[in-house]
Image (tube, coloured by chain):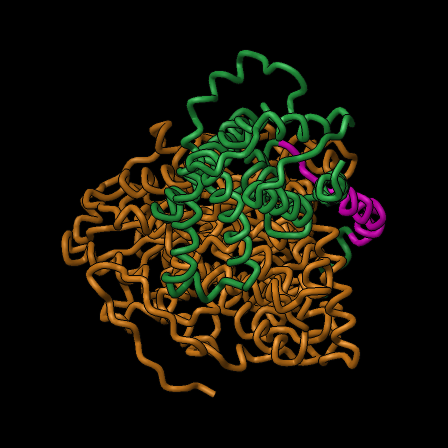
Amino acid sequence: MSVVSIFFTALFYISLTIFLVGMTRKIYQYWITPVPLKIPTAPTPLTQTGVVMRMAREVVLFESLFKSNKWTWLFGWLFHVGLLLVLIRHARYFWPGDLPEVFLLIQPFKYAAFAMVIGLFGLLGRRFFVERIRYISAPSDYLMLLLLLVIGVSGVVMTFTSNHTDVIMVKEFASGLIVFNWADLPTEVHFLVHIFMVFVLMAIFPISKLLHVPGVFFSPTRNQVDDARKKRHIAPWALKQEQEHAVKLDQTLGQDNSEGK
Amino acid sequence: MAKEFDIPKLPTYLEIPEINEGVMEGEGPFKSAKEFQSPLGFPGEKVDNWQEVAINKMGELKSKYRSVQVFLDACVKCGACTDKCHYFLGSSDPKNMPVARQDLFRSVYRRHFTFAGKYFPKLVGAKELDDEMLDDWYNYFHQCSQCRRCSVFCPYGIDTAEISMAAREVLDSVGVGQKYCNQILGKAITIGNNLGLPEPALRDTLLDLEEEIEEETGVAVKYPLDVKGAEILLITPSADFFAEPHIDGLIGYGKVFHQDGVSWTMSSYASEGANFGMFIGSYDIMRKAALRIRKAALDLEVSRVMVGECGHAWRVAYSFWNTLTGVGAGATDEFGQKLQNQLDSRYPQPQHIIEYTHDLIQQGKLNFDKSANDDRTVTFHDSCNVARATNMGGIPNGQFILPREVIKAVCNNYVDMERSTIMESTFCCGGGGGLLTDDLMEIRIKGAMPRMQALKEVEKSDAVDTLVAICAICKSQFSKVLPKFDFDPYMIASAHQLVSEAIIMDKPQTDDAPAEEVEEASETSVETETAE
């Protein structure tokens, strides 16, 4: 194996480890952090099924964003859906051996890459040109979009221009990573930039705003059932506190009324 | 302290302003003094090692509240919320954009609690908590009415109210509290209401009210206080006892109870529906205030707890009481079960007065002369806490449907304001969340602009002359700000004020038989020992 291949192979495992460990830690943190109060935001679902439906609409259609701003919704949704389709198409590289036929259905969606890139340019444009959004943007907000753009554009260049890379070789390299049967990777600069940025993205995922991905599922205003009157909802720390004070409360019953009189 | 400022113009269409940095910079509301801080357990003045205390408090809060932890991490700065806050729309100060307001807190979180912020602060906009930042916190987190409109539009449901509550809690913990909220809370948790009104004064007020109503209507409507064994305990904001138009709402509640013939009472010990503990973000103080209600319910042996017209009170009651005190149903723990055994499970606990009146209307128990309100054309202002944080009637969107149905049952002329300014998208009155104090008048007036704009449009198109609200803060705020926008300050009305105008009261059958006896006679078969 070439030095470049060894470098990228190592980088893959390092960034994957950071990604998995980091995400596990964050998700665990969200999981164990209590929700002391019922705070769903209207329009609230009154049942658990309603919550699942709401979350599905939020995650699949970006319902709240649609209500808020049609342009941001359009670009955001194009980017995310494009990215999803592109990611699924990439499964063929990581899948050792022949691909199950179901993946062939996704093949025509290679143009999703354009949706992704158009969405990203739209979002970047908003960040530059809309005064309010410019005001709230930190350098990292621009860099995140640039990082994704580099990934998207380098991918488009490889797919749709004459700068094709050797996909058979890519498959050997990528599936080799999965089954620990390491192989050389193509060394065209487009490809190297492409996967380097992907590895960077994986590594910064758990320490950046990309935490919105697990975050949305843990958002109490979106995932709570609006049934506060019907069912007592109480956090462990609050219940403990309550039990410690319960006796004292009973003792004061009927007594501290006098001070008001 | 009061500076000159322009009252916003009301455009035909609500426009998103260009940002004007620093317009609302300032010292914020009056700071609390030792005498108001100490009773709540907060330091009397800014502590020496305040930075350390504040950072520790932030760490504690994010480990106790998933909302805080997730909301601080998840924001992608998409800008969806930037044009949703009434204070931004009215003031154009960019720090009043919800995300920018949160970022005051988030930047410190990043600096102290995240890898990127610790090692690359400039890159991710992480900032140190210095004096300047703390001043910004104090100023701008008291320009948030915790109305949650931003949360409706956020793709992750990030709720600035949660962040502003957390920030205020941190501020209190280092001894930088707000006078208005903390002074009031002191009274609420020692005397039982925000006004510090003791039992004799309350009793006098209610007796006067009874006389007044009997004089006017010839019907002896009662406003009972501390009646043990009554069926319903009414918890209402103390503003209902004296402020206009709040008291007209209280008159309405009494008439509805009277017509239903139900036994009810208020409590001098728990004579406050409002719970400012929510505004300052303190679970413990909010609970302390709510526990007075639990105790009153137990002492008075009532079987139903009902809440009057008050926005955040209904949020605390509907969403939090069951958690805080067990007033509700479905408890599996001993503490909660104890009270819930006493409460009548056939009714929602707690119940809103609008739910109660609505239910009676459905049953045909109330008769109205709708023409009594024919001099009015009415619109309804959805109060933010009711609209975005509660429900009524147990049906989807009941909190929007029930008040409107009650209003339409008692008046003939009703129109809604522009859809994007009502229901879950309602604009705050501008005075909620602990901002209803004169030292915040500038932001209150500017923040009222979006609501006033929508009102102006229905005034033009449908000659609306009555604005109904079911929140004590909204009512007080509107009385103050309506004239600033060339409206009649008396156009603000309580929902039960309209009910009161239109309700047809059963007159006593003979001159010498008081209404009470008639009522009692009809009820003797049901009630046995409750009236001691």
Please give the name of the residue rendered at 44% of the width and 29% of the height, measured from the top-left corner.
A110
Residue B325 sits above or below residue B275 on the image: above
Segment colored magenta: A231-252
Q: Position of residue B312 (x, y in %)?
A: 51, 54
Say whether residue B492 is left or right of residue B27. left
* Chain the render paints orange: B
Say whether residue A1 is left or right of residue B222. right
Q: Nearer the viewer, residue A134 or A5?
A: A5
Would residue B57 be visible to someone looking at this image? yes
Please give the name of the residue rendered at 70% of the width and 49% of the height, measured from the top-left corner.
B295
Most common secondary structure along the magenta stretch: helix
Q: Nearer the viewer, residue A226 or B305?
A: A226
Residue B102 sits in which quadrant? bottom right
Q: Nearer the viewer, residue B255 or A61?
A: A61
Q: Is residue B34 magenta?
A: no
Say whether residue B399 is left or right of residue B185. left
* Chain the render paints green: A
Please give the name of the residue rendered at 25% of the width and 56% of the height, measured from the top-left corner.
B466
Image quadrant for the C terminus of chain B? top right
Q: Position of residue B150 (x, y in %)?
A: 46, 53
Would residue B356 be visible to someone looking at this image? no
Q: Is residue A248 magenta?
A: yes
Residue B401 sits in which quadrant? top left
